[in-house]
Image: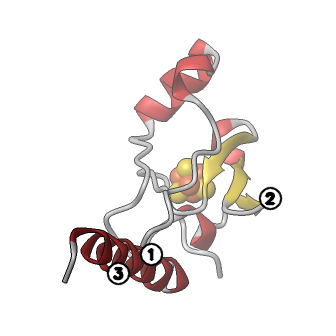
Amino acid sequence: MTMSTRRGFVGLMSAFACTSLASRGLAQAPAVCSDPATLPLSQRSRRRALGYTSPSNDPQKHCSLCAFFTAGAGACGTCQMLSGGAVEATAVCTSFTKKS
Ligand code: SF4
């Protein structure tokens, strides 16, 4: 195998791996619905007080399953407990309340 053929093979395998991971949703970057650095102090304080964590470590507890969550565009939504602040659907906080 020549050097250029080897590079072509490695490039092809990398492209295949990326496509394969993306098709299974494993290579997608987690959603970022709000930039913590630009949030108002009140939002940052409230999130800290509620232990807002993104993403959640518990697959049974995340914002999209919470009664306080309102779905928005894509993987983002808003939270009543955060005064309508933007949250990631995959995040969670200590006020999680499962939708009935
Ligand atoms: S209360 Fe917590 S878990 Fe529920 S939507 Fe708001 S931030 Fe997410």
Per the image, label 1 sits on a secondary structure element best described as: helix
Tell me which amino acid carries mark 3. Answer: Met
Q: Who is closer to the viewer here, 90 or 96?
A: 90
Q: Does residue 61 lie above or below 53 as drawn?
A: below
On the rendering, which quadrant does ligand 1 occupy? bottom right
Circles 2 and 3: CB atoms closer than 8 Å: no
Residue furthest toward the top?
A: 41
Circles 1 and 3: CB atoms closer than 8 Å: yes
> How many residues crowd around disc 3 within 10 Å: few (fewer than 14), some, or many (20 or more)?
few
Q: Who is closer to the viewer here, 62 or 50?
A: 62
Q: What is the C-alpha distance between the residues marked 1 and 3?
A: 5 Å
Q: Does residue 29 lie above or below 47 as drawn?
A: below
Q: Residue at x 31, y 77 (%)?
A: 5
> How many residues crowd around disc 2 within 10 Å: few (fewer than 14), some, or many (20 or more)?
few
Q: Residue at x 57, y 62 (%)?
A: 63
Q: Is residue 39 left or right of residue 22?
A: right
Q: Provide residue 17's location: percent of width, then percent of height.
A: 38, 80
Residue at numbered disc 1: 15
Tell me which amino acid carries mark 2. Answer: Gly
Q: Is residue 18 left or right of residue 83?
A: left
Task: Please identify the quadrant where the N terminus is shown.
Answer: bottom left
Q: Residue at x 71, y 47 (%)?
A: 80
Residue at numbered disc 3: 13
Is the residue marked 2 within 8 Å of ligand 1, measured from its CB?
no
Circles 2 and 1: CB atoms closer than 8 Å: no
Q: What is the C-alpha distance between the residues marked 2 and 1?
A: 32 Å
Residue at numbered disc 2: 72
Residue furthest toward the front?
A: 2
Per the image, label 2 sits on a secondary structure element best described as: loop
Q: Quadrant of residue 97?
A: bottom right
Q: Earlier in the sequence, mark 2 or mark 3?
A: 3
Tell me which amino acid carries mark 1. Answer: Ala
